[in-house]
Amino acid sequence: MTWATEFFAGRHIVVTGGTSGIGQGIGRAFADAGAIVHATGATQAEVEAGADNEPRFRYTQLDVRSTEQVAAYADTFGPVAALINCAGVNLRAAEFTAGGFETVLDINATGTMRTSTAFRSKLRGGAILNIGSVFAFFGAPHAPAYAASKHAVAGLTKSFAIAFAADEIRVNALAPGWIETAMTALPRANPIRNAELMARTPMGRWGTPATLPGRPCSSAPRSPASSPAPSCRSTGLHVRLSRCPRRAVVKRAVDRSERTRERDGPVDRWTILRVEIDEACVPQLLEDRCDIPFHSGMVWGG
């Protein structure tokens, strides 16, 4: 049992791209909490490998590029507590061709849109967590389509947070840094590139999929299965989570953004604000009783 057990035991969680890496790591955290985890993979080989590594999941082969396949898959579900959009590719050099660029965008960005809209009716009172990347905040000279797709995921997250609010669905994104997965095998194997990446990583080491699940669990429904789902409250705040010693800093930042809005008037619909928050604050920030009203539209990154 974990702290999340009372919230997720017996509930259905869908993880696209959940056969390995970050998706599998997140799925394991939900499974540890007693959730029924459904994981998808793009190929039968991925599904079989995932089942060998984590037999607790229910696996399905799914191509997120197919609107018909995604819709048919969503139709097999009743209520779903959370959708984790983790299906993604990085084609590197091939992304400098039109075909490669289109493939990456179709899977990483449009695929996230397809699954989110297909599961919308199943997720009332639940949550969507999109897996972005630090490349949502800067460019990737070696993988332009990957960076473009993750910028798109960040924008889609903020847009769906507003669009889905009426259905009491919270939509957030997690933007991991350098994580040990099959996708990062090449830079990890290159001593020069590896040293370069670790030099700009504060902890000086690669993260692992097992280090990520606390935030996904915190971003999903915060009510026990026997209780009503919390109301969905969206804000226009772009919150970038990192480190901060005091929750009060967040409150002061929110107050300051409100004063700025009052002083300058509605120049833009949303005030864009970056706030750095201690990881320990995340569950508190997402509790229904929290007095800081951001439940949706957040992009968490390092």
Image (cartoon, grey):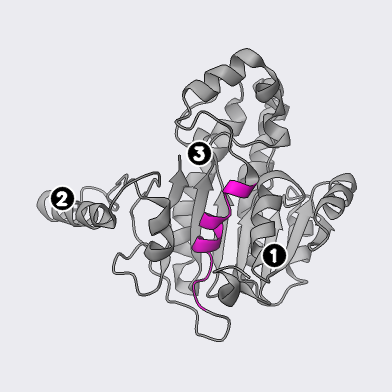
Of helix, strand and loop, which one carries label 1? helix
- Residue 13 x %, y %: 67, 66
Examine the image and state in which quarter residue 95 appears. top right
276 lies left or right of 302: left
The question of residue 222 being in magenta is answered with yes
Of helix, strand and loop, which one carries label 3? helix
Between the C-alphas of marks 3 and 1, the distance is: 30 Å
User: Would you name the residue on which mark 2 appears?
Assistant: 260
148 lies left or right of 24: left
Of the 4 image quadrants, the one containing the C terminus is: top left
The disc at residue 31 is 1
Between the C-alphas of marks 2 and 3, the distance is: 26 Å
The question of residue 279 being in magenta is answered with no
At 64% across and 73% down in the image, what residue appears? 122
Residue at the farthest front position? 1
The boundaries of the magenta stretch are: 210-223
- What amino acid is found at the position of numbered circle 1 in the picture? Ala
Mark 1 or mark 2: which comes first in sequence? Answer: 1
The disc at residue 151 is 3
